[in-house]
Image (cartoon, rainbow, N blue to C red):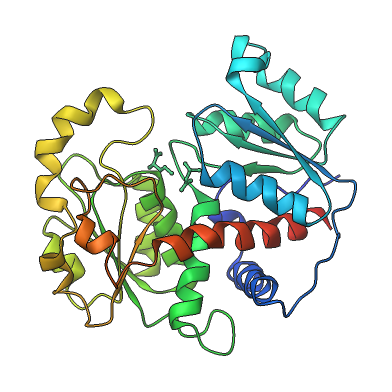
Amino acid sequence: MSGPRHFLDLADLSRDELVHLLGRARRLKEGREEAGRALEGTTLALIFRKSSTRTRVSFEVGIHQLGGRGIFLSDRDTQLGRGEPIPDTARVLSGYVDAIMIRTHAHDEAEELARWSAVPVINGLTDRCHPCQLLADLLTLEEEFGGEEPGAGLEGLKVAWVGDGNNVANSWLNACSLLGFQLSLAVPEGHDPDPEFLARARATGGVELVRDPREAVEGAHVVTTDVWASMGEEDEAEARREHFEPFRVTADLMTFARPRAIFLHCLPAHRGEEVTARVIDGPASRVYRQAENRLHAQKALLLELLT
Ligand code: CP
Ligand code: NVA
C-alpha cells in the first residue's frame, strides 16, 4: 500500500514534476489558471520549531486563498514543545488535518514525522534543506529567464552561490541536478555544503565549488547568498563574521557577473554582512518578487499534494 506523498526535499520531485509545478505556479500567479476554492474544507497544520515570517504567512495565506485553513503550532504552546514524541504527534494530527508542514532543526525529525503521518508532510526548512524556498527561487528564474515552455531556458544559466554552504545552498544543489543549470559555489573553507547533496549534483556535472567569490560570480546570470549564521548557529555568529568577510556580495563583486545579472536572497538578510545595502536595495535585486513567489509556488505545491 503506498502512503501519502511527502515533500521533504526537492529531490522528492522528478524533473518533469518540478517543471510542471513551476508552470502551474506561474499560471496561478498570472491568473491563467483559476484554482478557485479547490482546497475547500482542507486543513494544513503548520509546525514551527524555529521562527518564520515568509514561510508561515505564505502558507497560511495560500491555503486560505484556496478555500482551506492553516493552524499555526509553535513549540511554545503545543505538547510537542514539551517533549511529546513525533510519532504520537504525527498520528494524532493525521486524524485532524489533511497535511502537515514542519519547520524544525534536525531533518530526521521531519523524516520521522513523515514516516508516521497518514497525510502529506511538507518541509518548511530544516538544518539540511529548504525545498519550498527553491520552488520560489526557481519560479523567479522562470520569470526572469524562462522561455515559453516551463523549464526551457534555465539550462544555459550560471547561478553563483556566495557564502555559507547551508540548508539553502543544499537545495540549490538539488535544483541544479534537476534542471541542469550551472551552479558555482564560493564557500569559505570548513563551511561546504552537505557532501551528499554535493555528490549528487556533481554526478550531473553542472556544479563547481571554489574559494574565490569572483571566480564563482564571473559570467553569472544570478548571484545569490544567505545569512552567515543560520537559525541554531547564533553562538557561531561572531566567529564567523571575520571568516566570511571576503564572501560579502558587494556592488564590486556584482561587476564580475553578467551586465543584467540579478541578485536573490531568501531573506531575512543582514545588510552589511552577507550583502551590502547597495546590492540588495539596488536595481539587480529581485528579493521581494522572490519572497512573493513563495505564495504562488506553495499554492501550486498544495494543489499537487492535496487534489
Ligand atoms: N525565507 C524564509 O524561509 O523566510 P522565513 O524564515 O521568514 O520563513
Ligand atoms: N539559512 C537560513 C535560512 C532562513 C530562511 C536559516 O536556516 O536560518
**Can the viewer see residue 178?**
no
- The residue drawn where x is 61% and y is 10% is 83
Looking at the figure, which quarter contains the C terminus?
bottom right
Residue 59: x and y in percent read 65, 47
**Can the viewer see residue 227?**
yes
Residue 172: x and y in percent read 41, 58
Outermost residue on the bottom side: it is 148
Outermost residue on the right side: it is 41
Position of residue 305 in the picture relative to residue 139 (left or right) = right
- Does residue 82 sit above or below 16 in this rendering? above
Position of residue 279 in the picture relative to residue 142 (left or right) = left
- The residue drawn where x is 26% and y is 22% is 235
Position of residue 89 in the picture relative to residue 67 (left or right) = left
- Does residue 24 sit above or below 63 in this rendering? below
Across the whole image, how many numbered discs are drawn on residues? Answer: 0
Give the quarter of the image for residue 87: top right
Of 209 and 58, the residue lying toward us: 58
Residue 219: x and y in percent read 21, 78
- The residue drawn where x is 29% and y is 72% is 284
Residue 194: x and y in percent read 35, 44
Of 86 and 75, the residue lying toward us: 75
Looking at the figure, which quarter contains the N terminus?
top right
